[in-house]
Amino acid sequence: MDLNGLLESTVAGMGYEWVGCERPGRLLRLYIDKPGGVNVDDCAAVSQQVGRLLAVERVDYDRLEVSSPGLDRLLRKEGDFARFVGHKARVRVRVPMDGQRNFTGVVREAGAGRVRIEVDDGRTLSLELGNVETARLVPDIRGLQR
């Protein structure tokens, strides 16, 4: 049984984006999203549906958590980068570029297995997605402050 595929199709069937899951120990933690963000009711609905699915599939776990990926969400797939074009991200590459592994900048384009990032010093880098070790959005909290 492909648990990730099963969970992804269930979540997508409910109208949410499947961001991913973690299984630390006997905890099963799912991350979902939708345009405009998810709320507690969204998480509860997915939790109920997934709980029933896991019972039918006899998946062994102790606790299920469903949550938003957060303001600093991980960018894993090409589609994640494409969705957040124009947003700032912090990227760590596996193989250094110009002696550097960590970059922060605005995602300008994603496609054909690459992502272009305009870094803070004004350069635009074209990174192979296979060389991206981790990438996270940098939250823009200016609009959240009062």
Image (tube, grey):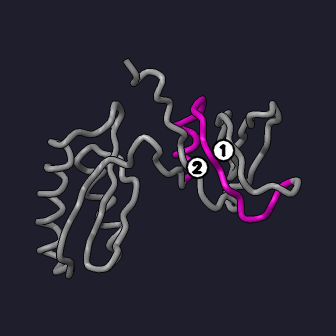
Of the residues shown, which amino acid type is indicated by label 1?
Answer: Gly
Give the SS element for disc 1.
strand
> In the depicted view, which residue is nearer to us: 82 or 86?
86
Is residue 60 inside the magenta stretch?
no
- Give how far across and how far down residue 39 sits, in percent: 22, 39
Residue 78: give x, y in percent of width and height: 58, 49
Rounded to the nearest whole Å, what is the CA distance between mark 2 and mark 1?
7 Å
Residue located beneath label 1 in the image: 111
| Residue 78: mark in rendering | 2
Q: Label 2 neighbourhood size at 10 Å, few (<14), some (14-19), many (20+)?
A: some
For the point 71% across and 52% down, which residue is it?
102
The residue located at (53%, 42%) in the rendering is 137
What amino acid is found at the position of numbered circle 2 in the picture? Glu
Question: Which span is picked out in magenta?
Answer: 77-97
Q: Depth check: 144 or 36 in front?
A: 144
Identified at 27% across, 43% down, the residue is: 15
